[in-house]
Amino acid sequence: MNSSAEPVLNIRHSNISDAEQIYTVVRDAFSREEEAALVAAVRQAGEAVIELCAFLADELVGHVLLSPIRIEPHVDLNCLGIAPVSVLTRLHGNGVGSALMGRAIEEARGRSVDAIFLLGAPAYYQRFGFQRTHIGNEYGATDAFLVLELEKGCLAATEGTARYVSAFSDTGV
Ligand SMILES: CC(C)(COP(=O)(O)OP(=O)(O)OC[C@H]1O[C@@H](n2cnc3c(N)ncnc32)[C@H](O)[C@@H]1OP(=O)(O)O)[C@@H](O)C(=O)NCCC(=O)NCCS
């Protein structure tokens, strides 16, 4: 029996009624509007493949979005990008981001995704198995462009540039 008064973190798929709270959480996490607008634009375009929300009691405190990544020139792999991942600023450092990442990876695995890309701090994301990749990206990032191959070795013989869906360039993120 859980006798603790600490609220339990609950993660579930988002639904349309979460949209307003998600916007608030993403804006708070990044201290600006752009990423929140990006999430709304990706969803509006029907390109939110996996979208998860974290709740403490009834409060939406974290969010993660995964959308398709295309590797150009055409590579026939099922790839997703994690972006953005957001946790309410006042709750940073309490494990919410890690719990969202873990669940996102699990969900992607369940959908037979070959590889997940992200742009972020290697010191944080390497704990989930992300590593530097030889695959290029449209942002010209080097050390910060990371991959997790769920299908081990799937990118070994692949060259190319990873592209996020158009909402990323449209919103300037
Ligand atoms: C990044 C973020 C989602 C992490 O969520 P969180 O709930 O604070 O993360 P956790 O509590 O699970 O993990 C905290 C750990 O991550 C580390 N961490 C967080 N952001 C980091 C960063 N940018 N670089 C390196 N380490 C980072 C913390 O130092 C801490 O390390 P420790 O476990 O060794 O003490 C959250 O800080 C956030 O919303 N940041 C603003 C938005 C953002 O930058 N998102 C990522 C890019 S899309």
Image (cartoon, rainbow, N blue to C red):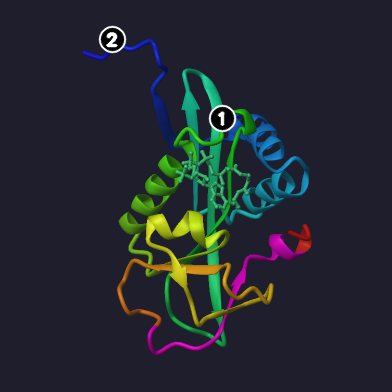
Q: Please state the extent of the stretch shown in magenta in the rendering.
A: 156-169
Q: Secondary structure at mark 2?
A: loop
State which image quarter holds ligand 1: top right
Residue located at (31% from left, 71% from top): 151
Work out whether 119 lies above or below 157.
above
Image quadrant for the C terminus? bottom right
Residue 151: say if magenta. no
Q: What is the crowding at mark 1: few (fewer than 14 residues within 10 Å), some, or many (at least 20)?
A: few
Q: Which mark is residue 3?
A: 2
Q: Residue furthest front?
A: 123
Image quadrant for the N terminus? top left
Where residue 80 appears, as percent x and y from the top left, is 49, 63
Q: How many numbered discs sit on the rendered protein?
A: 2
Residue 166 vs residue 75: left or right?
right
Residue located at (43% from left, 35% from top): 12
Residue located at (52% from left, 81% from top): 135
Residue 132 vs residue 170: left or right?
left
Q: Amino acid at mark 2?
A: Ser
Residue that mark 1 sits on: 91
Q: What is the crowding at mark 2: few (fewer than 14 residues within 10 Å), some, or many (at least 20)?
A: few
Work out whether 161 lies above or below 110.
below
Q: Earlier in the sequence, mark 2 or mark 1?
A: 2
Work out whether 72 lies above or below 172.
below
Residue located at (43% from left, 64% from top): 130
Q: Nearer the viewer, residue 172 or 42?
A: 172
Where residue 87 appears, as percent x and y from the top left, is 57, 37
Q: Nearer the viewer, residue 42 or 138?
A: 138
C-alpha separation, residue under disc 2 versus residue under disc 1: 22 Å
Q: Residue furthest left?
A: 1
Where residue 169 appears, as percent x and y from the top left, is 74, 65
Q: Amino acid at mark 1?
A: Leu
Residue 162: say if magenta. yes
